[in-house]
Image: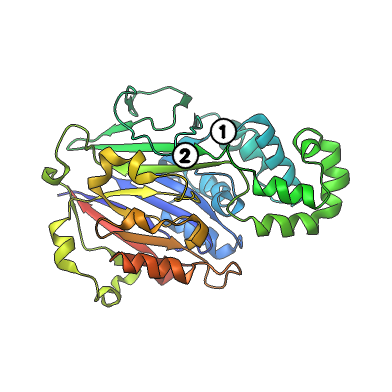
Amino acid sequence: MFLIERIFHPIGQGAFYSERHKNFNIVYDCGNWKNTKLADKVVKQAFVKNEVVDILFISHFDYDHVNKIKTLSEHTQIKKVIMPLLHEDEKTLLINLYRALNFHISTLIENPQKFFGQETQIITIEASENSENPINDSIEPINLDNSTTTNIQSGSILRKNFKSYEWLFIPYNYQYSSRNNELEVLLIASGFDVEKLKTNSKYTINKAISNRKKLKEIYTKVNGNINQNSMLLYSGINCLHRDCEQEAFHLDYPFRYFRCHDEFHHIRWHRMRKERHRVSCIYTGDTNLNVVKIKSIFRNFWKSVGTIQIPHHGDIKSFDKFVLDDRYYWCPISVGETNTYGHPSCTVISEVTSQDSCPILVTENLSSGFIEHIRC
């Protein structure tokens, strides 16, 4: 018996998730809004010094999802980074905005190879405007053990072959190109020239930095919605050519740090025992589930999904309760205990529970971390 371990780390208002397979580690996002020393400790305690992180997946470049990547990269050896492909004007706008706000992550966006070093392979995911067509194997699957590609299509299937099983990672980068970018609308309304912010570094210095307080207010207001990309990730078993229910994978009893089982006493365990094959997870970042129809996109894999990260810290505008309307799900929500955004929405919590699923708040409290073990 071998355990795959999936951890939702207690990072607070941010995101930091990891999976451990045998001699193979992945991380999805790494950051928190308050940028605390405690968050640094959480990241460092997740891995021993110089341990290998085989893949770091970055959903998007909001500060609270990426500002601890530097800590992670200094503490571990990151072999591959998979991140959304940004258009040049969007990249420049983010760089200038973060420079003006004194957020020190501009190099990550502008030159990720320099940020991580030459030994790290950078892979970008092209944006897709398809919000519901299902992923299948019409695109040639990519074997992670011998791939040297640096740019792949959204929805590509990344295969990792272990000695006794195969695991899939499917990054899906959706671009909200049909909507007005809320950040740009607010910048214009506040008197900023967005085109110059995208192209003119002197304008950033002379105009933006001198209005740092106003920019901070705008950034805070649109938290979770500053750019047009949001990369989801399916991590789980291959359902395309076999019956997932017959797979030799089983989800063990999930637990909090320190195994506080009593908080789950209300869960209908007889349902979960019958569906322990649902070992796959969908990480959503800050994706708007009302726009991106994940049950359609991952339709060919859905019967194996048992865990869904609720996006954007439980923000009501990003949640669609019908994602959970067919059966029971574990629903971790990364949220700060004292955040000022009203996250998570009580309506979201109510809708998750009304669908007979279990919301799990993962905060900066060290006892709130959530772990899943998968036997195979």
Left or right? Give the position of 90 relative to 32: right
Left or right? Give the position of 144 relative to 312: left
At label 1, the amino acid type is Gly
Q: Position of residue 250 (x, y in %)?
A: 17, 52
- Local SS, label 1: loop
Packing grade of label 1 (10 A; few <14, some 14-19, many >=20) is some
Q: Quadrant of residue 171?
A: top left
Q: Nearer the viewer, residue 217 or 188?
A: 188
Residue under numbered circle 1: 117
- Local SS, label 2: strand
Q: Quadrant of residue 90?
A: top right
Q: Nearer the viewer, residue 227 or 74?
A: 227
Residue under numbered circle 2: 78
Colour option used: rainbow
Left or right? Give the position of 160 relative to 123: left
Residue drawn at the location 47% of the way across and 39% of the way down = 78
Residue drawn at the location 59% of the way across and 60% of the way down = 33
Q: Position of residue 363 (x, y in %)?
A: 47, 67
Packing grade of label 2 (10 A; few <14, some 14-19, many >=20) is many
Residue drawn at the location 20% of the way across and 59% of the way down = 252
At label 2, the amino acid type is Ile
